[in-house]
Image (spheres, helix red, strand yellow):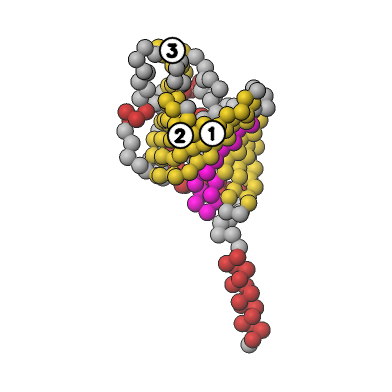
Amino acid sequence: MVRHRIARLASLVVLFAAPAFSQTLHDVAKRVNDHYNHLNSLEAKYTERYSGMGMNKTETGTLLLKKPGKMRWSYAAPEGKLFVLDGKNAYFYTPGDAQAQVIPAKKLDDMRSPLRFLLGHTNLEKELDHLTMNSSGDRAYFTGVPKGMEERVKEFTVAVQAATGAILGLKVEEIDGSTTEFTFSALKENVPVKDSDFTFTPPVGVEIVSGMPPV
């Protein structure tokens, strides 16, 4: 009887000590998909770190997303810098510049663009080629290459909270050796947002011109 009780206790210890989520790529990817396919909007604080082309810089700000495919990256440092995607076009503006750049969303290959699928119809296994997954503690790390960005991106990593599917960070390693990394915090889901939040209005005297996104 005592042996049976000890064996039962041992099995319970193993059960509750085991991770609360499946370690399989498909199951965790589905958790991420389900999490974001039920969202209409998202707000988060972000830190962006870039290394490459002889530069190392860190920028911070607030990210706002809304279905379908709308984003607004409002930078606090440097204050006034903007990246706005209104669903059709993307706008880039840096304080002090005489011009803001616009590029059609379908031609966008900016490093922020892979995040668009989170507020479309999310499917990690279809969005990323050569997908693999590693886990550490309560986090899982998906690595692959975003479809259509093979000529620019060497490796794209998505860090998620495996138990919930919430995305906590992105890391993009480009073919030229440069790296862009985003970390997210203070996530607020299904916050009230308006379409006007994703309208770019240039400062007085600033001209909007066609172009490619700056680094």
Residue of label 3: 98
Q: Position of residue 132 (x, y in %)?
A: 64, 43
Judging depth in this view, the residue of 114 and 83 nearest the camera is: 83
179 shown above or below 44: above
**Residue 194: mark:** none
Q: Are marks 2 and 1 in contact (CB under 8 Å)?
A: yes
Mark before the other along the chain sequence, 2 or 3: 2
Find residue 156 and report its horizontal and vertical position in percent.
Answer: 61, 35
Alpha carbon distance from label 2 to label 1: 9 Å
Q: 94 or 146: which is nearer to us? A: 94
Q: Which residue is mark 2?
A: 61
* Range shown magenta: 160-174
The residue that appears at 59% across and 59% down in the rendered structure is 19
Q: Quadrant of residue 128?
A: top right
Q: Residues within 10 Å of mark 2 (few under 14, many from 20)?
A: many
Could you give the CA–CA distance between mark 2 and mark 3, rounded to whole angstroms?
A: 22 Å
The residue to which callout 1 is attached is: 48
Residue plotted at (36% across, 18% down): 203
